[in-house]
Amino acid sequence: MDLLTTAKKAALEAGDLLKQGFGTSFQIESKEGKQNLVTEYDLSSQKLIVEILKGAFPTHHFLAEEGDLKQMPSDEILWIIDPLDGTVNFAHNIPLFAVSIAAARGNEILAGVIYQPLLDELFASEKGSGAYLGKNRLQVTDQKNLEEAFTATGFPYDAYKNPMHCIERFGKMVAKGIPIRRLGVASIDLAYVAMGRFDLFWEVGLHPWDMAAGKLLIEEAGGKVTHYDGSPHQIYSYLPILASNGHLHEIMVDYLKEDLA
């Protein structure tokens, strides 16, 4: 079984598990404050995904949100997993969350899937083969005017510390009259850029499992993913991410470079 087929299988089975748990009573714990939660479904979903992937690829490595990988393998395949992206939404019965799974070698994403269980939307991409929602090939928008763009962002769990002036940057976009959505699920934000629901997305404080699959989706759909300064995106760097349809990218880079101190 190939990487993408196995990732799809794992995402669909984990999604079924999450659908069963959504809206029920379950245990919720805090990892780093009231906005960073973990539920028993994060853990059970991750266990299921890893079991499926290990069953198909016993020599591969794993980096997961609820895991503790100590050292990144340099030239071997690493699975990057968010078993429940949008835990806070899930815990508050907000029906917007996803499973995100990507296979990488170094900084190169080879395959990735993002699955929205409640909408039964399976986004999938393989390097060099395009990005798809089901059987429909994805394509980013051709929007070239930032003032007319439909955008998305997110905030880190320590937003009160205002890292990278994220609050001011958000306020400046709002002041321009640019529509902004904040879904609380970065993987879905990225998938929506890939399919053209959003024109661009930016956020500080994301982890590799938040964005690995989405990065490949956007690139395979004709978009662009970098850091705020326009430099090539490194998935393990924990630096801010800017993802766009490509046409708006340099405009947004210039905007994000503005001195807000």
Image: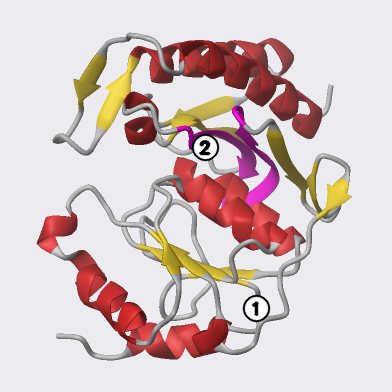
Mark drawn on residue 100 = none
Q: Give the mark nearest the N terminus, 2 or 1.
A: 2
Quadrant including the C terminus? bottom left
Callout 2 environment at 10 Å: few (<14), some (14 to 19), or many (20+)? Answer: some
- For residue 236, side relative to residue 145 (left or right): left
Write the start and end of the magenta stretch as one range: 95-118
Residue at (42%, 17%) from the top-left corner?
A: 23
* In magenta segment, residue 101: yes
Judged from the image, the secondary structure of the residue bearing numbered disc 1 is loop
**Amino acid, disc 2:** Pro
Above or below residue 51? Residue 180 is below
Mark 1, residue position: 246
Residue at (43%, 50%) from the top-left corner?
A: 183
Question: How far is disc 2 from disc 1 in space, using C-alphas?
Answer: 31 Å
Mark 2, residue position: 73
Residue at (16%, 65%) from the top-left corner?
A: 162
